[in-house]
Amino acid sequence: MIGTIAATLTTLGFLPQVIQVVKTKDTEAISLGMYFMTTIGIFLWAVYGMINKDIPVLMANSISFISASIILYHKIRYNKKYS
């Protein structure tokens, strides 16, 4: 039960940021390094879940990976530093 709640919260925790970034295209306050490392880490957790046939780990991290990737994409695309 605790694991399910934790997975749900950490997976859905990205959604408010995804919605804000997609709406505003403002990523100035987001750390590129942090989101890059987080996205890679989440991807590796999904791979771990796949290798170990752990469906909850695979599903939660696959959804989180998509959300984190959207934010990372917008950070790279709309960052004034790289424009």
Image: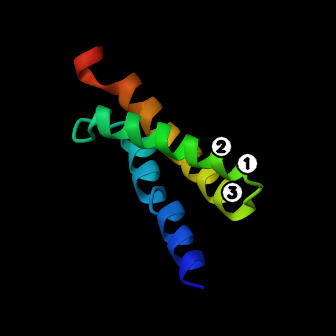
Q: Residues within 10 Å of mark 3 (few under 14, many from 20)?
A: some
Residue at the (48%, 64%) spot, across then down: 10
Q: Secondary structure at mark 1?
A: helix
The quadrant the C terminus occupies is top left
Q: Which mark is residue 50?
A: 1
Q: What SS does tag 3 mark? A: helix
Q: Real-space Cα distance between discs 1 and 2?
A: 5 Å
What residue is drawn where x is 26% and y is 38%? 31
Label 2's element? Answer: helix
> What residue type is disc 1 on?
Met
Q: Is residue 31 above or below residue 62?
A: above
User: In this rendering, is residue 10 above or below 4?
Assistant: above
Residue at mark 3: 59
Contact (Cβ within 8 Å) of mark 1 with mark 3: no
Q: For the residues carrying marks 1 and 3, which lies nearer the camera in this image?
A: 1
> Quick one: quadrant of the N terminus?
bottom right
Given contact means CB atoms under 8 Å apart, are the residues at marks 1 and 2 in contact?
yes
Which callout, 2 or 3, points at the residue further toward the start of the chain?
Answer: 2
Q: Residues within 10 Å of mark 2 (few under 14, many from 20)?
A: some
Residue 9 is left or right of residue 31, and the answer is right
Determine the residue positioned at 43% across, 45% down: 23
Horizontal and vertical percent position of residue 56: 69, 64
Q: Amino acid at mark 3?
A: Met
